[in-house]
Image (cartoon, helix red, strand yellow):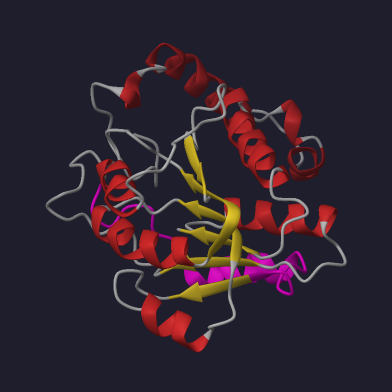
Amino acid sequence: MPENQGHTYGSLESVKFNHRRDDYYKYVEYLKNQDIPLEDYLHDFTAYIGHMSLNRLLTIYELYKKTLGMAGHIADVGVYKGASSLLFAKLIKNFESEALTLCHGFDWFQGTHIGENDSSLVADGGYKTEYESVLELIKMQQMDNILKIHKLDLTKDLPDFFDKNKHLRFKLIMMDAGTYEVMDAAIPLFYERLIPGGIMIFDQYSHEFSPGEAMMLHKHIPHAKVMTIPNSWMPNAYVVKE
């Protein structure tokens, strides 16, 4: 298992693309042995990125585009290394440069806490990164006026956070911290603050890694029509608030 991946593979959704895995890691090793300047990875990243990683970026972009013209902010629930939070911030900078839209990232930066209702395939304490390193990455890219990171325990601290920030309303919410307890606490509080027509994205709906996403979605939004971008593997579901 690659370093910092934070999970092992099961027998259902997580292995659908197993036939690609060996070739992918051969390609990764090939890149490690090439003398490729860092600037090439930054400026010409589409020459190197895997098509499934690119697919994820395009899916997030497509869902973001559906919210253009709506009022409200973006929430990224589960920051990890900041990849999706910074993508949202850069989309805001490119498409809403004069708007007040912000991206709010939420994480406790202690890694995944696995409870009795969660998948044993995900490592307890996995997907952990340093809060300060994420802040530094944001600052170095001059994105700290657009992207705000909130270090808190999503299972306990959200009521107090929203009590202190009563004005916050969202047009787009990305659920990417799919443990049972986090989803149980976060979905109702964020959905209450999602504007009509706004979108809530689920990273691993009906997936063996994250049973809590589907369970808590249907508990708290029982009549939701769950949709997908047909060619997307992850995130793989979204609902539109009526």
Give 32 or 132, whichever is nearer the viewer: 132
Give 30 or 19, whichever is nearer the viewer: 19
List the single residue furthest toward the left. 116
Residue 103 percent across, percent down from the top left: 64, 64
Q: Judge left or right: residue 173 versus residue 47.
A: left
Compared to 157, does 130 lie above or below?
above
Give the residue displayed 74% in from the left and 44% down from the top.
Answer: 38
Residue 144 percent across, percent down from the top left: 70, 73
Say if the magenta span includes residue 126. yes
**The N terminus: image quadrant:** top left
Give 40 or 117, whichever is nearer the viewer: 117
Q: Judge left or right: residue 17 versus residue 180.
A: right
Compared to 149, does 9 lie above or below?
above
Residue 154 percent across, percent down from the top left: 36, 69
Give 30 or 116, whichever is nearer the viewer: 116
Compared to 87, does 188 lie above or below?
below
Give the residue displayed 50% in from the left and 14% down from the top.
Answer: 23
For residue 224, what is the image quadrant?
Answer: top left
Say if the magenta span includes residue 84. no
Residue 150 percent across, percent down from the top left: 51, 75
Give the residue displayed 59% in from the left and 53% down from the top.
Answer: 198
List the single residue furthest toward the right. 98
Give the residue displayed 52% in from the left and 56% down from the top.
Answer: 81
Looking at the rendering, the stretch of residues picked out in magenta corresponds to 123-147
